[in-house]
Amino acid sequence: MAGGGSGSSPSRTLLNTPTWALATVCFIFIFLGIFIEHLIHLLCHWLKKHRKTALFEAVEKLKSVLMQLGFLSLLLAVIQRPISKICIPNRITNSMLPCNRDVLLDSTKTINSEDHCGSRGMTSFMSQSGINQLNNFIFVLAVMQIVYSVVTMALGRAKMKRWKRWEDETKTIEYMAANDPNRFRFTRETTFGRRHMNKFTNTSSQLWIKCFLRQFFHSVAKTDYLTLRHGFITAHLPSTNALNFQKYIERSLEDDFKVVVGISPFMWLIVVIFLLVDVHGWNIYLWVSFLPLITVLVIGTKLETIVAQMALQLENQKSVIIGSPLVQPNDSLFWFNQPQFVLTLLHYTLFINAFELAFFIWVTWQFGISSCYHEHVEIIVVRVVLALMVQVLCSYITLPLYALVTQMGSHFKSALLEEHITQAIKHWHTEVKRKKKNKLQELESSHYSVATTQITSPEIKLSASAHEIQEISEESPKVNIVHQNESQIGVD
C-alpha cells in the first residue's frame, strides 16, 4: 500500500521482546474485551427487561457482525505469511496503482529488495505489512457502518418525537370536532388538500420538482401525519380508533433497524469492487461520494410524491368528502410495488456513505495526512462534506419520511399485530378484574345474607362458598400484561 512506513532494520519479534511488555499488552486487550462483553450483556438484559424485542435482535445481529469481523481478522493474521511468499513478476505490480508510480518507485525497491520475493528478482503478491493495513481497514469499515446506522436511527427518532404530540391530539375533543364524520367539505378546502392540490401538480415533472424542494422545508407536516394515520387505521383496523400510530411506527422502525445494522455479503463485494477501481487518476471515490447524496434525494422526493399522489387520487375520486380525508394505502405507489425496496436502498446508501468516511479515516490514520491519497485537498474536502451532508439529510429528512410513508402499503407490518394483541389482552384483563370484583361482591353479599337469616347448615354454605371461589379462580388466571408504558402487571 502507498505511503506506509518501512524501515530498513528488521522488526523485533517476541523472542527479543521483554515479558513485561508482552504481559501488559495482553492484559489491556483482555480487559477491554471483558469490558465490552459486559456492556453488551447489560444492554441485552435491559432490552429484555423492557420488552424491546426488535432492538434486542438488532444487538444480537451486531454481535454477529463483530464475530464475523474477528474471524476475518484472525484469518488474515494466519494467512499473511503464506500470501507474502507468493511471487509475481515486477511488470505486473506496476499496473493499476492507487498512487503515482514515480512517487512509489524508490520505496518499493527498498521493500522488495529485503523480502522473500525480492531476492529472486520478483515482487510479493502482497506484503505482510499490506495485509495488516487491510485488516485495519476492515475493522474501521465495520465500526463506521455500525456507528452510522446507530446515529442515523437515533437522530431520526429524536426528530420524530414531536409526532407524540400529534398522536395525543387525536384524543382531544377539538380534534374530534374538527373531524366530525357528519361534516361535509370540499376536498380542496381541507388542510391536506390545500397542501397538496394546487397548480404545481398539473404534470408529473411539476409534481416531482415540487416534491424535491418540499423535502427540505417541512417535509412531514401535521396534516400529512394525521391524514395518513386516519387512512391506515381505516384500512387495517376499521373497528377501532385506539391504535397509537406513533408507537407503532417506532416499533416498525426498530424492526427495520435489525436490517440496517447488518453487513451483507453483497456489501463486502461492493467493497472489493471499490478497492479494485481505486486507480490513480480515476478519482473514483470522488464520484462515489455523490452516489449516496443522489440516492437519498431521490428517495426523499419519491416518498413526498407518494403522499401527493394519494391526495390527487382523493381529489379525482370525489370533490366533496364527509369527515376527514380518507387516503387509500396501496403498494402500487412504490417502486416495483414493494415498499420494502426503499429500506434496501437506504441500507446500501448508508453503507456506501460509511465506506467513504471509513476510507478517509483509515488512510489518514494509516498513512498520514500528507500521503499520496491526499494529494488533492479540494477532493478530500468535498468527500468529507458530502459524507456529513448525507448523514444529516438521511437522519432528519429521509428517515422520518420513510418511517411514515412506507406504512401506506397494502399490508401492515408485524409491529401492528403486537399492538393489537396488547390492546386485546388489556381489554381481557380489565374484564377479568371486573368479573372478579363482581363475584367477590356477590360472595360477600351471600355470606351476609346467610348470617342474618341464621341458616343451620354451615356445611352446605362452606361447600357453596368453596365452589364459587373455585369458579372465580378459574375465570381469573394469572397473566402478564405489557402496557403502553411497558411495565409488567401480575394478576392473580
Image (spheres, rainbow, N blue to C red):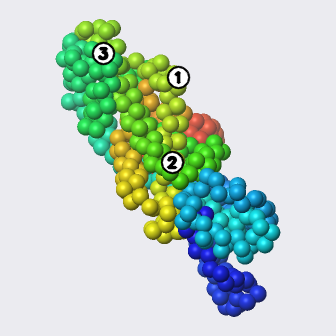
* Residue designated by label 3: 203
Asked which secondary structure carries label 2, the reply is loop
Foreground: disc 3 or disc 2: 2
Foreground: disc 1 or disc 2: 2
* Residue designated by label 1: 336
Mark pair 1, 2: CA separation: 34 Å
Residue 43 coordinates in the image, percent (x, y): 54, 60
Instruction: Count neighbours of disc 1 (C-alpha within 10 A) and say few if under 14, some if 14 to 19, many if 20 or more.
Output: few
Q: Of the two numbered discs 1 and 2 on the same chain, state the one appearing first in sequence.
A: 2
Amino acid under disc 1: Phe
Foreground: disc 3 or disc 1: 3
Q: Of the two numbered discs 3 and 1 on the same chain, state the one appearing first in sequence.
A: 3
Mark pair 3, 1: CA separation: 22 Å
Please tell me in which quadrant of the rendered image residue 227 appears: top left
* Residue designated by label 2: 282
Q: Of the two numbered discs 3 and 2 on the same chain, state the one appearing first in sequence.
A: 3
Badge count: 3
Residue 80 coordinates in the image, percent (x, y): 74, 66
